Amino acid sequence: MSTIAAISTPNAVGGISVIRISGENSIEIAEKIFRSTSGKKVAEMNGYTCAHGIVVDRDGSQIDEVILSVFKSPKSYTGEDVVEISCHGGIYITKKILRLVLESGASLAEAGEFTKRAFLNGKLSLTQAEAVIDLISASGQNEFKYAIALKDGAIFRRIDKIKSRIISVLVDLSAWADFPEDDIPEVDPDNLLKTLKDIYHELDETNKTYDYGRIIREGINTVIAGKPNVGKSTLMNCLSGFERSIVTDIAGTTRDIVEETVQLGDIKLRLSDTAGIRNTDDIVENIGVNLAFKRIYEADLVLALFDNSVELTDEDLQLIKKLSDKKVVAIINKSDEKSMIDRRVIDDNFKYVVEISAKNNDGIDRLVDAVNKMFIREDIDAEKGIIANERQKNCIVKAQSLVEQSINALEQGELLDAITVLLDEAAGYLLELTGEKVSDTVIDEVFSKFCIGK
Ligand code: GDP
């Protein structure tokens, strides 16, 4: 394989930048451009050691003072010989050193190519490699915890266990089919059925972790809804910590959808503040209202606002009707004003009700508690492995459907051969999930999501 190089730090000015080189010629390439202060050659350095020195241009002139680290195969991130040059963090210097490395024989790494090599050299499973992406983009404690669990191989172990059970059934089936006259005990259909149902259940439990993982990773798609002037923009601003929506006393001023991501306790919300829901003849405003209903329909969570200071209106009742099968926190806003609202209607329709004053930033902690209570799943343990993406989910769904078909086949008394074929295919999808048996196209697709230098 060729020797590759890329800048592994962001393309920005910073204290330090790192240029990473990986492949069989990395040490030879580093030798060409690096002069250590001690006089020691790069080839003489042990793995996991570093040296101070300078990077020199082809005419011998100094480009930068650097620290060079050497990782020898197979004890490196990629499993190959790796050299990392930590230089001063200017864009110009970093690019100049990279250019020199490329001129000295390396080729520019593609997106995710270092991690791809780590996978191809057996340093990481495919699911662990995918976890690297999540780890890099983790923005909250929960997200971090789950990416770490994934990187530690939690989902790999979980899938591996299910896969081993399927393979053990396949071994029994084929032993019996191939050597029926020998002393091998006959496959007991009741036992087999029970095992298959167990396997199905385990796949189903794993499948269920996907939505939770998505919520932790991407945040909860949340809509703030309510009639005009109820305080939607004020709440949005209060949650996001700065003025984004236009707050006015004129009913109907928030016509566009404003989006913001906020971290509420352990949970991340992707908030959109919608146009106020009201009956109107204004065409532009009507588009906004329809869009608001569409957003409500698509949302994972609705923060439904009601005004404490006035009686419930038709618009409020219309909103309540739209929310019957949604996850909702009903928020009674303007708790600082004299109460005119019919609280019973709200209490009768919603499980989670909180009183706040968005204007005075009062009661927001109760809102945070309610949201966390709704979404933090104590029963889902990140350390047992959570499905991280669509690719993994698709493999599970396909395996699950094949196991279901094998259960049906067995119940209908079909030949064990048919069951073997179905289970064999199911095991194939689990091998694809872990990356043990996966096509180049899938591998390329996984790593194309990485950034260059990772
Ligand atoms: P929206 O149309 O639903 O986005 O409502 P706004 O956020 O624009 O607020 C409408 C009006 O209600 C503004 O004058 C706000 O200052 C006021 N308001 C918002 N929240 C509160 C609150 O908690 N208490 C009181 N008294 N007024 C509020």
Image (cartoon, rainbow, N blue to C red):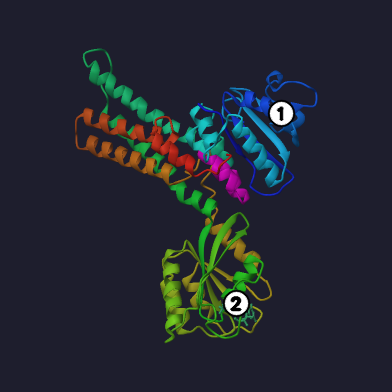
Instruction: Report the front residue among 78 and 418.
Output: 78
Give the magenta-colored segment's residue range: 130-147
Q: Image height check: is 18 above or below 328?
A: above
Q: Position of residue 9 (x, y in %)?
A: 64, 43
The answer to whether the beta carbon of the residue marked 1 is less than 8 Å from any atom of ligand 1 is no
Where is residue 195, by image quadrant?
top left
Instruction: Report the front residue among 28 and 282.
Output: 28
Disc 1 crowd, CA 10 A, few/some/many (<14, 14-19, 20+): many
Q: Is residue 269 left or right of residue 401?
A: right
Q: Position of residue 294 (x, y in %)?
A: 41, 69
Q: Is residue 90 left or right of residue 269?
A: right
- Pointer 1 or 2: first along the chain: 1
Quick one: SS at disc 2? Answer: loop
Instruction: Report the front residue among 340 and 268.
Output: 268
- Tell me if I can see residue 264 in this picture: yes
Tag 2: amino acid: Ile
- Indicate whether residue 143 is drawn in magenta: yes
Where is residue 190, by image quadrant?
top left
Residue at the image point whose x is 51% and y is 74% from the top? 256
- Name the quarter where the C terminus is drawn: top right
Q: Which residue is mark 1?
A: 34
Residue at the image point whose x is 19% and y is 34% from the top? 413
- Indicate whether residue 443 is drawn in magenta: no
Q: Position of residue 210 (x, y in %)?
A: 46, 48
What is the magenta segment's predominant secondary structure? helix
Q: Which residue is mark 2?
A: 246
Q: Image height check: is 192 above or below 389?
A: above
The answer to whether the beta carbon of the residue marked 2 is less than 8 Å from any atom of ligand 1 is yes
